[in-house]
Amino acid sequence: MKSTLMAILVLSAVFSAQAQEAYQAPRVTESLLLDIDHSDFVVAVGERGHILTSTDGEVFNQQAVPTTTTLTAVTVLGDKVWAAGHDATILYSADKGKTWVVQMAKPELEKPFFDITFFNAQQGIAVGAYGLFFRTNDGGSTWKQELHASILSAMDQEYLEEVKQDSPEYYEEELSLILPHFNKLRVINDKLYLVGEAGLVATSDNMGASWQRLEMEYQGSFQDVALINDSTIMLAGLRGNVFVQRNNEAWEQVPTCLSGTLNSILTDNSDAIKLYGNNGMMVTLEQPIDAVIYDPWAAPGQCTPANGFSAQQTKDKASIVNVTRFNGHLIAVTANGIQQLETE
Amino acid sequence: MASFTTLLERLIFGYRKVVVALFALVTLYLGFQASMMHLDAGFEKNVPLNHPYMKTYMDHREDFGGANSVLVSVCDANGNIYNQQFMDTLQQVHDALFFVNGVDRSSVTSLFAASTRFTEIVEGGFSGGPVIPADFDSSRQAALDQVAVNVEKARIVGRQVANDYSCAMVTARLLNLDPKTGESLDMLQVASDLESDVRAKFENDSVSVHIIGFSKMIGDVANGAKDVVLFFAIALAITAVMVFFFSRNIMMTILPLVCSVVAVVWQLGLLTVLGFGLDPMSILVPFLVFAIGVSHGVQMINAVEKKVVAGMGAQHAAMSAFRALLVPGGVALLSDTVGFMTLLVIDIGIIRELAITASLGVAVIILTNLILLPVLMSFLSLNDNYVKQFNKKEQRNSAFWKAIASCANKKPATIIMLVTVGLFIFGWFQSQQMKIGDLHAGAPSLQESSRYNQDTFLITDKYSLTVDYLSVVVETSPEACTSYGVMRAMDDFQWKMANVEGIQSTVSLASVAKNVNAGFNEGNVKWQVLPRSNQMLAQDISMVPTSSGLLNGDCSVMPIILFMEDHKAETISRVVTAVKTFRKEYETDDMQFKLASGPVGVMAATNEAVESAQGPMMLYVFGAVIILCLISFRSVRATLSVVLPLYVVSVLAQALMTYLQIGLTVSTLPVIALGVGIGVDYGIYILSTMSHKLKAGATVQQAYLDALKERGSAVLFTGITLAVGVSTWVFSSLKFQMDMGILLTFMFLVNMLGAIIVLPALSRFLWLSKNDPDA
C-alpha cells in the first residue's frame, strides 16, 4: 500500500514536472537573468524560471525546470544547486543543475526571495522581501519560516517591545509587517552579513539565529556587501551609494556621484574593486579606497567622485545584477541576459 | 448584324456634323469634370478590407492605428546636439510643428516639451523634473551640460535622442478632423505644410531635418505621381512621331491622336462623375486607354488608306472602313475588357477600381476611335501625292514581311520552338522563386533613393526605432489589465514571439508593467515581474497612459507589438505562422489574440490576399482568353497557337520579376492580367486572317505571309505604341510605377514578338499536313 502510494506520488511529480517544463527558448541567453554562481560549473537563473548552466563559461544551456516563476537567486555548493525566487519558490538540483525539483512554493505569501545561501549541504537560509526568512536544516527537504526582530533598528525594536507588552497577540503580525526587504546574504570571515532596505546592515555569528544590526546614518537600500581587504567592509546600493568601514570604525562614504543603483561588488582583484549596477554601470575603485565622512545634507549638484574612481557603461546599458569570474571569463547577468564583460 | 451596321452607318454618316457636335459637347462637359479630378491617395482601397487581419485593424484603428503620427528628426552636422545653434533650431522646429494645421497640439513631444521629464529613484520614492528646465539658456555651457545629464536620467536616448547624440526627435500625432473646417484632415496639405514650414525653414548646412510618417509619405507619393503629366506628354510626342512615320500624313497623324486624347478625357471625366479619384496606381489607366486608342486608330487609318489607294474618296473610304472595323475592332476591345474584368475577383479596392476604370476607358474607345475617328476622317481631302507615297510603302514592307514569314519554315521554326521551350523551362524555374510582397526596406511605394526613404533609413539607423512592426491585438474583457492571469498570458505569449527569428524586439502593456513594477521598488530588477495582486498591478498600469498605444480606455484591448527586422514576405509569414501556433496555448473564450495591426499587419493581410488571388486570376484570365479564341476560331489548334505563346510570356514575366527583385504586390498583380488581356489581340489579328486562308486551302507559310501583309504593320505598330505608352513609367520616382512600367513594357513587346515569331513556328507543327513542301 505504502509503496503504491509512493509510486503514485513519484509518478505525479514526474508528470507535473514534465507538464510545466520551461519552453526551450532560442534567445534565452538574452532574457532577464538575475543571479549567477559557480563551482566547477556555472548556473544563472532569471525570468520565467529560466536556469542556464555552462561548463566552460561560454556556451549556456537552458535546463528543464518545473516552474515558470521568476528566479532571483542561486547558490552552488559542490554539485548541489539551490535557486530561489518569486512566489516564495525554492528549487534544488543535486546534479549540477541538470534536473530540478521544487522544494518549496508559496505563492499565497505574495513575497519573493532575493537571496539564498547554504553553510553546508544541510544548513541554509533564504531571505527576501518584507522580511521573508526561511531556514532548512535538512538540505532543503523542509523549510521553516523565521522572524527576527533583532534585525530591526533600535527604534523599531523598542516599538515592538511596546506592542508585545500591550497586545502580545499582534506582536508577530506587527513584526512581519515592519520587517524590511532583505536583499543579500554574504558569509564573510565566518560572519553572516545581511543587507537590505532602508539602511539595513546586520551581522550574525550563529548562521542567522540571532542578529546584530549595525548603525547606519544613511537610510537608503543596500544591494551588496563585501570584504575588500583584511579589515575593510564595503556596502553598495541605491543611487550609487558606496560605504566602507575600516577596522570596525565609523562608516565612511565613497562618493561616486552616480544616480543608479549599484547591485554587485567584485573583489577578486587586489588593486581595484569593481562595482556593477543599473543602466549597465561598471565602476572601478582603486585601492586604497578614498572615502569621506558621510554628509546627508550635501547638495546633489556639487559632487566630486572619490580619487581612483572611474566608471563606464555597457553598450546596451542593461542593468547588471551580478557578475562572477569563471574559467577566464567575467560573466555578468543582466536585464538583457548573459554578457561577457571585458576583463581588460 | 450587317443590317445593323448599315443602319448605324447611315445614321452616323448622314448626320456627320451633328455627331461631331455631340462629341464636342460631351468632351467639353467631361473635360470640365476631369479638371475637377482630385488626387485620391486613400489608404483603405490599397488594402484587402475584408481580410480578417484588416477587420481587426479597422476595429481598433481609432486606438492603435498609429498611422497618423509624424516623426521629425533634427540632426546636427557635427554629430553633437549639445550646442546653442542646434538647441535653438530644435525649439523652433518644435514650435513650427505645433502650429502646423491638423497637428494635435497636446501631442507634440520633444526635449522642449513640458511632458519630457526625468524620474529618478531616490531614498523613499521618486524625484524628477523637466529635461529642459524652464530657465534654460542655450548660450550657457552649464545649461547644455545639465540637459545632457537629464537626458540620460530620462532614458530617452534611442527614442527622443539619437543613440549617437547627433539628432533629436520632435514627434506629434495628427487629428482625424481638420480643426478649421471640421472635415477630415487633408493629408496632402499636411505633407506640404511639413515640407515648407518644418523642413524648408530650418534646414541648412549645420542642421538637417528628416520627416517621416504616413501623411508625409502620402504627400511624397502624390508629388511623385504628378510627374506622370510629363510622362504622358513624352508618350504622346513619341507616339505622334511613330504615327507620322506610319501614315506619312499630318492630318492622319493628328486625328487618331486627337480621338485617343478625347477617349482619355472622357475616361477621366467619367471617373469624377462616378465619384472616383485618381490615385497613383490608376494613373496607369489613361496611358493604357491612350495607347489602345492609338493602336485601334492606326488600324482605322490603315483601312482608310487602302480604300483611298483603291480609288475611293475620303468620305466613302471612311464609311467603308467604319463598316469593316466596327465588329472586329469592337470584339478586340471587348476582349481587352474581359482581361480587365478578371481583376474584379481580387478583393482589394484599388485593383477593382483599376478593373472598372480600365474597362470604362476601353468602352469609351469604341465610341471615339470606331465612330468619331472615321467621321472626322470623312472630312479629309486626300490628294494623289498621298496615294503614291502609300504605294511605295506597301512595296517596301512586302520584302520585310517575306523575311519574317520564314519563321514558319521548317528549320527556323524548329529552332524557334527549341529556344521557346528552353526559355519556358528556364522561366518556369525562375518564376517559382518569385517573391510575394515588398522586398525592399523603407516605404515600398517610393524608390530607395527617395528623400523619404533616406530619412526613414536615417531614423531607423540612428534611433532604436523601426517602422516595421506588427501588432497582435489582445481582445478581452474590460479592466482585464489588472488581472494577473491575462497579463501573464500576454507576457508568456510575447516571450515566445520574441524568440521567433526575424523579431527584433517586442513590447506590450505586460512588459511595460514589469518595468514599472521594478521602478516602484527602487528600480530593483529583481522586482521586474507582474505582481499577482490586483492592486499592485493596477498601480503599475496607472503609470502607462493610453497615449502609449498599449491599451485602450478600459484596457479591454491591448496590442502586443512585435518589431521586425524587415518586412520581407518570408519574415512576415514566419511571424504570422508563429502567432497562430503560440496563441492556441493562451486563448480562452474571454481572451483572443487577434491578427493584426501595425504597418506589417497590413502587409501580412495584403500579401495573403495577393498570393491567394494570383492563382484564380491567372485561371480566369486564361480561361476567358481560351473561350474567346474558341468562339472566334472554332478550332483547338488555332486557340493553342494563340494561347501557348501568351502563357510562355506570362511565365517569363514572372521570371523577370524574380530576376529584377520585383515582388508580387497589389500593383504588380494586375500586370499579368492586363498584359494577357491586351496581348491576346496580336495573336487574334494574325490568326483571324491565317485561319481564313487555311480554311481556303492555303499552306501555313502562305497564310502567314498574307496575314503579315494585311495585319503585320498594325500588329508591330500596336505593340510598339503600347510599349512606348508605359515605358516612360520606368523613370517614375514611384517604385511601383517603375515596376509596373517595366513589366507592362515587357509583356506588350514580348507578346508581340510571340505573336509574330512563335505563333507561326507553332502553327507549322500544329498544321503538319498543311505545310509548303519546299519550306
Image (tube, coloured by chain):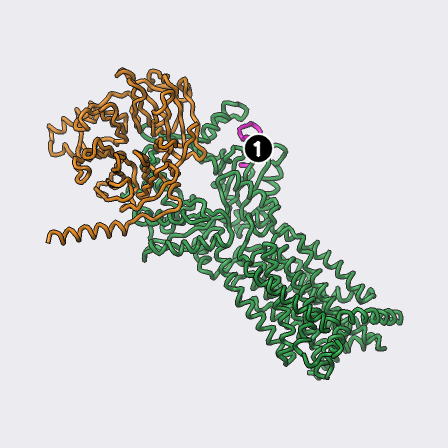
Chain colours: A orange, B green
Residue B91 within the magenta-colored segment of the rendering: yes
State the residue in front, B465 or B352: B465
Name the dominant secondary structure of the magenta segment: helix
Relative image position of residue B272 (x, y in whole percent): 62, 62
Question: Where does label 1 land, which residue?
Answer: B76
Q: Residues within 10 Å of mark 1 (few under 14, many from 20)?
A: many
- The residue at the far right in this view is B384
Q: Is residue B391 left or right of residue B565?
A: right
Q: Please state which amino acid type lies under the numbered disc 1.
A: Asp
Could one spot residue A323 in this view of the protein? no
Residue B693 within the magenta-colored segment of the rendering: no
Label 1 resides on the chain identified as B
Relative image position of residue B575 (x, y in whole percent): 44, 52
- B124 above or below B448? above
Q: Which element is circle 1 on?
A: strand
Q: Residue at coordinates 30% horizontally, 28% vertically from top-left?
A: A224
Relative image position of residue A152 (x, y in whole percent): 21, 26
* Occupied quadrant, residue A318: top left
Looking at the rendering, the stretch of residues picked out in magenta corresponds to B80-95
Could one spot residue A292 in this view of the protein? yes
Q: Is residue B697 left or right of residue B738?
A: right
| Quadrant position of the C terminus of chain B in the picture | bottom right
